[in-house]
Image (cartoon, helix red, strand yellow):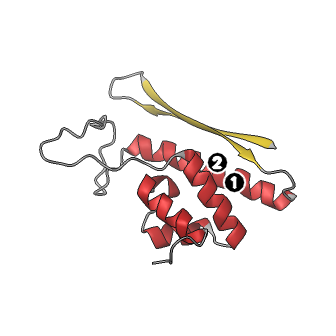
Amino acid sequence: MLKLNAAYSKKVPADEEFSSKSFHASIECELPDGLSENQLKEKIHNTFELVRSSVEAEITNVQPNGAETAGKPRNRSGAEGSKPAAPPKASSKQLNYLLDLAHDKGVKPREIMESAGVDDLSDLNKAQCSKLIDELSGKTKAA
């Protein structure tokens, strides 16, 4: 079993002069033995892309409705008036499993994003990811 660690960090200017905000994400996942060089490179690329896009999304604070609130912290409690809380994001374990299944079935990450109606895999919530996993593993019919 191989372990893959992917990390991405970025500093952006803060509101105050001579200060910055730092954003960082990392993920550790296990890769199956016996991957070819190309499969290994693809796994590394997909995992790094997931981490990078997650940090970039956090920096711009893209809200579910598409509104950007750069520099403003998100209200994670869901207590903004009558707005319901956003569904929980898919875990890295779920996303890695989804990518493994997709790779085994010859499905590209771009196709998954298009079928789910998201711009990035990190935008998938737990329910969406679970549904896609079920579809790829043959447990339910594709929509």
Nearer to me, 134 or 40: 134
Q: Which mark is residue 18?
A: none
Q: Residues within 10 Å of mark 1 (few under 14, many from 20)?
A: few
Instruction: Note whether residue 125 is visible.
Output: no
Reading the image, the residue beneath label 2 is: 48
Quarter of the image for the C terminus: give it.
Answer: bottom left
Q: Residue at x 59, y 59 (%)?
A: 98
Q: Is residue 108 above or below residue 124?
A: below
Who's the residue at 21% across and 49% down the image? Answer: 84
Q: Position of residue 128 (x, y in %)?
A: 44, 61
Which of the 4 quarters of the picture holds residue 138?
bottom right
Pinpoint residue 81: horizontal percent, then vertical percent.
Answer: 12, 42
* Mark 2 secondary-structure assignment: helix
Please name the residue that numbered disc 1 is placed on. Answer: 45
Relative image position of residue 123 (x, y in whole percent):
44, 55
Give the amino acid type for the residue marked by disc 2 in the picture: Phe
Mark 2, Cα crowd under 10 Å, few <14 / some 14-19 / many 20+, is some
Alpha carbon separation for disc pair 1 and 2: 5 Å
Q: Secondary structure at mark 1?
A: helix
Q: Is residue 7 above or below residue 122?
A: above
Report if residue 61 is visible in the image: yes
In the rendered image of this protein, does residue 24 appear above or below residue 1? above
On screen, residue 35 versus residue 76, left or right, reads right
90 or 114: nearer the eye?
90
Task: Identify which residue is drawn at 44% across, 53% down.
Answer: 126
Query: What is the count of numbered marks?
Result: 2
Q: Amino acid at mark 1?
A: His
Q: Residue furthest top?
A: 18
User: Which residue is pictured at 81% across the width and 44% down the height?
Assistant: 1
Marks 1,2: beta carbons within 8 A? yes
